[in-house]
Amino acid sequence: MSPVPLTLEGSSVLHQIFRFRWIAWRQLSLPERERVIDEAVELLESAEEGNGPPRPSQSALYSLIGHKGDLMMVHFRDTFEDLNQFELDLAQTDLYEYLEPTHSYVSVVELGLYESSAKTYAALAEKGLEPFTPAWDIEIKEVLARQSAAMAPRLYPAIPESKYLCFYPMDRRRGEQVNWYSVPMQDRQRMMHEHGLIGRRYADEVRQIISGSIGLDDWEWGVDLFAEDPVVFKKLIYEMRFDEVSAQYALFGKFYVGVRLKLSGLHHWLAGSLKPPPARI
Amino acid sequence: MSPVPLTLEGSSVLHQIFRFRWIAWRQLSLPERERVIDEAVELLESAEEGNGPPRPSQSALYSLIGHKGDLMMVHFRDTFEDLNQFELDLAQTDLYEYLEPTHSYVSVVELGLYESSAKTYAALAEKGLEPFTPAWDIEIKEVLARQSAAMAPRLYPAIPESKYLCFYPMDRRRGEQVNWYSVPMQDRQRMMHEHGLIGRRYADEVRQIISGSIGLDDWEWGVDLFAEDPVVFKKLIYEMRFDEVSAQYALFGKFYVGVRLKLSGLHHWLAGSLKPPPARI
Amino acid sequence: MSPVPLTLEGSSVLHQIFRFRWIAWRQLSLPERERVIDEAVELLESAEEGNGPPRPSQSALYSLIGHKGDLMMVHFRDTFEDLNQFELDLAQTDLYEYLEPTHSYVSVVELGLYESSAKTYAALAEKGLEPFTPAWDIEIKEVLARQSAAMAPRLYPAIPESKYLCFYPMDRRRGEQVNWYSVPMQDRQRMMHEHGLIGRRYADEVRQIISGSIGLDDWEWGVDLFAEDPVVFKKLIYEMRFDEVSAQYALFGKFYVGVRLKLSGLHHWLAGSLKPPPARI
Amino acid sequence: MSPVPLTLEGSSVLHQIFRFRWIAWRQLSLPERERVIDEAVELLESAEEGNGPPRPSQSALYSLIGHKGDLMMVHFRDTFEDLNQFELDLAQTDLYEYLEPTHSYVSVVELGLYESSAKTYAALAEKGLEPFTPAWDIEIKEVLARQSAAMAPRLYPAIPESKYLCFYPMDRRRGEQVNWYSVPMQDRQRMMHEHGLIGRRYADEVRQIISGSIGLDDWEWGVDLFAEDPVVFKKLIYEMRFDEVSAQYALFGKFYVGVRLKLSGLHHWLAGSLKPPPARI
Amino acid sequence: MSPVPLTLEGSSVLHQIFRFRWIAWRQLSLPERERVIDEAVELLESAEEGNGPPRPSQSALYSLIGHKGDLMMVHFRDTFEDLNQFELDLAQTDLYEYLEPTHSYVSVVELGLYESSAKTYAALAEKGLEPFTPAWDIEIKEVLARQSAAMAPRLYPAIPESKYLCFYPMDRRRGEQVNWYSVPMQDRQRMMHEHGLIGRRYADEVRQIISGSIGLDDWEWGVDLFAEDPVVFKKLIYEMRFDEVSAQYALFGKFYVGVRLKLSGLHHWLAGSLKPPPARI
């Protein structure tokens, strides 16, 4: 069995995707709509704001393009219970009557530690510690705690303010000949390193949050990309498609692209407009 | 034909997954809701309690995270008829009007006896008994009866009280090159042994119940993991993904993660809250 | 082109799977329910009884476990027109309003004649008859007629009274490397023979009816297993999964498991009970 | 690039598959049903009759067996616009309220000219004509025009009167190792020839119409088989499954089997009967 | 890692596919229909006309053949926000009540620059510029800007007036043995060149617009073909299926074929006719 890289886990994450029942919504009178919006905003505004650092625990809304959904909500929380409680809270609002759930994704923010895992395993081996012995476990726990503290802002991220979001889940291939989980650790580490170099070249244009979902949802990872220009999603992912780890080992699920919808714009959106009407003078 | 490992079978198991029709539910008056809940609780409370050992035959409820379902019920019973009767009973309650079945899984608790199968087959061969002869059959039946008695508590398990459940079905790969069912028994036994060692290291944090569903449902096995912290599901399954039997031979279905919902909390849940309101002084 | 084994065909078979609309049903008054049941029973009772030998042409009902369906009807008839007419008859009953079709399967009872095909082909070759010549065709027709007469009870079976049914469709694999239809006839014959030996060891516990559906439905064969104990389905199919023809060449569709529901029990079932209430003294 | 066989195209073809809303239909009064039927028959009867040779442009109805649909309509027309106009016409009838579209297939009648392509390409090469030069194009066009005229009755077929129809779409495999489109033309030609020989042996029992749908629908070809006995579909397709081109290169979609429903029988069918009631004396 | 070809991006593209709710529509009175149509036309007519060059930003309607949809709208816009705003605008019309979204596709017009990428990379290498250095980046940006300007009409296309449209998404294969993204750049360039030669032979009959959707939707590219005769779609795509890049590396999604529906014809279409009624004299 090839060594397993250490991972750090942070915020619990839920993506909720809804189709909006426009026809039913438009049958409401304007005062009824106001009431429904006010109630929803009450729930959503503290979620949008969150708690600030060190654990922002924010939510954000996106207006989706295409038939897969009209609205996406992305939630970062401290626990799965908190995520589940938000789902229940939303279901108690009158707005929920107009939200048809079409998809969702459950995960936790994850940082894979290929490089420090390799170093740590080597160092412990040099010390003569056998893997999974109590002494080894203690050392590993210390490494994880140290890294967790150092990387807290990335483990418990605030949601970037970028105009566009691209979300998709992915797997590492487990084929009959080409199987990520049978590749030696050293090769996986090298490929992940090269993969990271591409991302770094796009760092000015794209913010990325990786969450892990093995054992939690139907793919192994979820990827959220944030950018001002959606063409950058295409350029980045196209370029990555040629690097070894993606070309050989990446399998992709459905892609969702949306425009950030601040809660202050929810009124306009529910009246059919991405942008507020021009201010009257 | 490679030898077939002996298996022991215990409780019949049904997982029922429902979306909850919140919109219709919220149209009920509070007294109507009370009546519906009371009727459902009457059915469910004896099921939650079960019969105690040796055959607990319990049911449990989980509040699911994500759009695949809102509620999961897990039932352990003595027979498939008992499971089917529960389905019929539930369908006669008024609560059923608000439960939209989205998925289910049918299986029986199974213990695979790789190690004792190998020993038994070797011993019988040494005695000169040909497989499937009457004498051989009698000896096998005795082994199974002895093991069944010894493992009764694991074959007829009570449902752990843990806060979180992770359920998923899985297959052993039957690919054109990589095919579990063509691997020599000895290699399968070795891989299953190594696989078990990982599980053992997590034994303090995760309880696991394996049920078999070949011939009963669309995957070969169902896996239920019970833990206080859902991140442990991810860590355990990620680590296992690198062991040989999983890396090469495991195929996974959909993953369902839920928060345990005791029947005493059903009122709160149906009012939109995972937890009871704080007690008034 | 590898020789094609001869097959015999018997009854036309239709599996109908329905979800039952419990919510709508329960809105009927008891006298309305009685009327609906009486009308349905009138259609179904002659179907359940059938015509007796030599062509029983029976139907049977099963109460299904899990969300894939609540009721399964299995029909054996002389022709596809008869099956289609039954569908139309059922659609004219008021009970049909409560039956939501979720799946079906169309096939004909089939007996594959691997052994006698090999012998026949060899004998005709020895006589110097070229395949597909008129003389060869006549001899083949005679063999088929003789075998058909001899196997009539298996080609036109009555439906076993067993408590449980397991139904699933299957294919022989047509992979890029592993392809049943490119295997030499002799090897196919040997593998089918070994496969049959397992079935024979279970003959006391399981009755099996194979129907062919190439050109008729979306898989190549349908398998119906009848037994008193559903765990036997699992044991039999698990054991078969290791034999060569299944390990290498079998692909399986969805599995349906149900409890036999005699028409005399339909009243109880529609009132939510698998069994009649205990007789009053 | 391996040479591409020439093809001839004829009638545009649309298969429409509907589930019939029996419950809603049965809520109509008998006079309302009559009115609806009369209106539909007015549209359908000229379609059933068609225009006679040379371009019959007929439509036909089939009563389908199984849950995939209750009614199938097969339309042959001169253009795709004509097909689309028929869809629009049908949607304007009151009968359409009871027809739930579940599937469809769009294609054009196609004759593949493997043998004459090979000869033509060889002859043109011998003449020293380079492929795709203007001179070559002219010669090819002449060949196609000649063949089209000669095969007009097969390109613009009338719909056979047979009692049963079997429809299914299919692909040629484009696997990583086994790929029809990389096979040398000569081998494709040989395999298609052998494939045709099987069909010829069934010519008395089965009429076949092949239509091409590359670029038009989701599979590469559609196959319609017409016969008096549906078991012949199974026998023919089973036998073909062993020939090289099918064993190695054929992938199949869903199979639909129906009983021919002449328009004169539509009244009976809508009253739940495949056949007219016996005439009173 | 194999070099990545440069690409140019132009208009943002949305395909919207709807089933039309004929039954509900036909329940409207004629004046109500008029009102609904007038409102929709007001939105659609400026979209159909667009802005003229250099950025036409047009929309077009198609009447689809088959059950996958009744209407397709194709939109070219400057930004994803504009596309999303159109979706919102359409959802506010009363016509939207009769439009059931069944599919959509999100992409951007793309021109792949295999030939000039190769030349540019070679030239920069000769100059001694390392890939991804600032100097290299500047040169690449200049090449892209120059090409973008030169190809503006193809990057921001007007919608051809052709009678028929064929739309389908596609991927390059990423198999375990056959993997486009692991093929050397030079071979990819050669195969794309050969592929282009086929398209050029059809240039008189078919207009083609390629859009890229990596990171934007579930396939890698979308293909729109415009022609007067739909059989040409079949001929072109069949022929391409044999060229190396398609035979080995192309995977195809669903195909949609429609008849152009000018907005001036929407009245007729909504009354069930592709064509206006013949003018009265």
Image (cartoon, coloured by chain):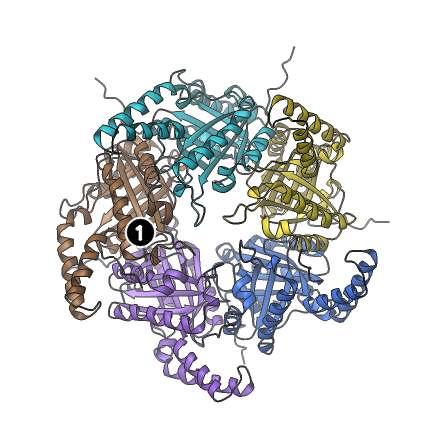
Chain colours: A yellow, B cyan, C brown, D purple, E blue
Quadrant position of the C terminus of chain C in the picture: top left
* Residue at mark 1: chain: C
Which picture quadrant has residue D118? bottom left
Q: Toward the viewer: B182 or B66?
A: B182
Q: Toward the viewer: D249 or B276?
A: D249
> Quick one: label 1, few (<14), some, or many (20+) residues within 10 Å?
many
Residue shown at 41%/25% (left/top)? B76
Helix, strand or loop for disc 1: strand
Q: Which amino acid does label 1 sit on?
A: Val
Q: Toward the viewer: A79 or A110?
A: A110
Which picture quadrant has residue B148? top left
Residue at the far right: name it: A281
Residue A101 seen in render:
no
On screen, residue B234 versus residue D227, left or right, reads right
Please provide percent x and percent y for residue A241. 64, 54
Q: Toward the viewer: B183 or C49?
A: B183
Quadrant position of the N terminus of chain C in the picture: bottom left
Relative to E219, residue A20 above or below: above
Q: Number of numbered discs present?
A: 1
Please provide percent x and percent y for residue C16. 32, 45
On screen, residue A231 versus residue B71, left or right, reads right
Residue D32 seen in render:
yes
On screen, residue A98 versus residue E3, left or right, reads left
Please provide percent x and percent y for residue D130. 53, 84
Please provide percent x and percent y for residue E262. 60, 69
Residue shown at 26%/52% (left/top)? C189
Relative to B124, residue C36 above or below: below
Relative to A15, residue C181 above or below: below
Residue under label 1: C106
